[in-house]
Image: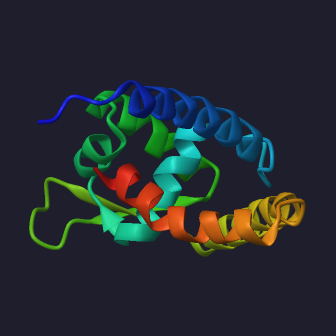
Amino acid sequence: MTELSEDDRAAVNSLRSAVMRLSRRLRHQRVDESLSATEMSVLATLTRCGTATPGELARKEHVQPPSMTRIVAMLEAKGLVRRDPHPDDRRQVVVRQTEQAEAMLVESRRKRNAWLAQLTERLTDEERAVLREAAPVLEKLAQL
């Protein structure tokens, strides 16, 4: 692995700082303020994967299984997920989001996208072009 240059280290520091600030600002655009960031993340994960066992969700969300059990119970109490019998293993359950959760996430994405689009209107055409080029790279970093 190649060592980063001084310029690359400075860019990494700037990227980290900007992503954290932007993430904090995006979090304030939530539709449902009663959900924690972790609960929202679990719902987003279920959107991507459809269903998952609590153990799979814990791994994907980088939390301990007992914590995920509590998160799923809270989401279930709010009507945002339901537990169904596992199709292959009766000792387990699979978690899926409800239509209520899906509608909330759609509205949340709409609100956040609108907010971010409003911000990008302040950028130049060239800056927006750079963002279009950077988006797949940032997505790749998020998946690593």
**Quick one: 24 or 60, which is closer to the camera?**
24
In the rendering, at what x and y percent does residue 83 appear?
A: 39, 60
State left or right for residue 33 relative to residue 15: right
- Residue drawn where x is 44% and y is 31% of the image: 7
- Tell me if residue 81 comes above or below residue 6 in the rendering: below
Is residue 36 visible from the viewing direction of this image? Answer: no
**Quick one: 100 or 13, which is closer to the camera?**
13
- Residue drawn where x is 45% and y is 45% of the image: 72
State left or right for residue 50 relative to residue 98: left
Exactly how many numbered labels are in the figure?
0
Q: Image quarter for residue 66?
A: top left
- Residue drawn where x is 21% and y is 66% of the image: 86
- Tell me if residue 88 comes above or below residue 92 in the rendering: below
**Quick one: 73 or 22, which is closer to the camera?**
22
State left or right for residue 106 relative to residue 1: right
- Tell me if residue 124 comes above or below residue 34 in the rendering: below
- Residue drawn where x is 32% and y is 35% of the image: 62
**Quick one: 16 or 124, which is closer to the camera?**
124
In the rendering, at what x and y percent does residue 52 appear?
A: 29, 61
Considering the image in quadrants, where does the N terminus appear? top left
Q: Image quarter for residue 53?
A: bottom left
In the rendering, at what x and y percent does residue 36 appear?
A: 63, 37
Q: How is the image coloured?
A: rainbow
Is residue 134 visible from the viewing direction of this image? Answer: yes
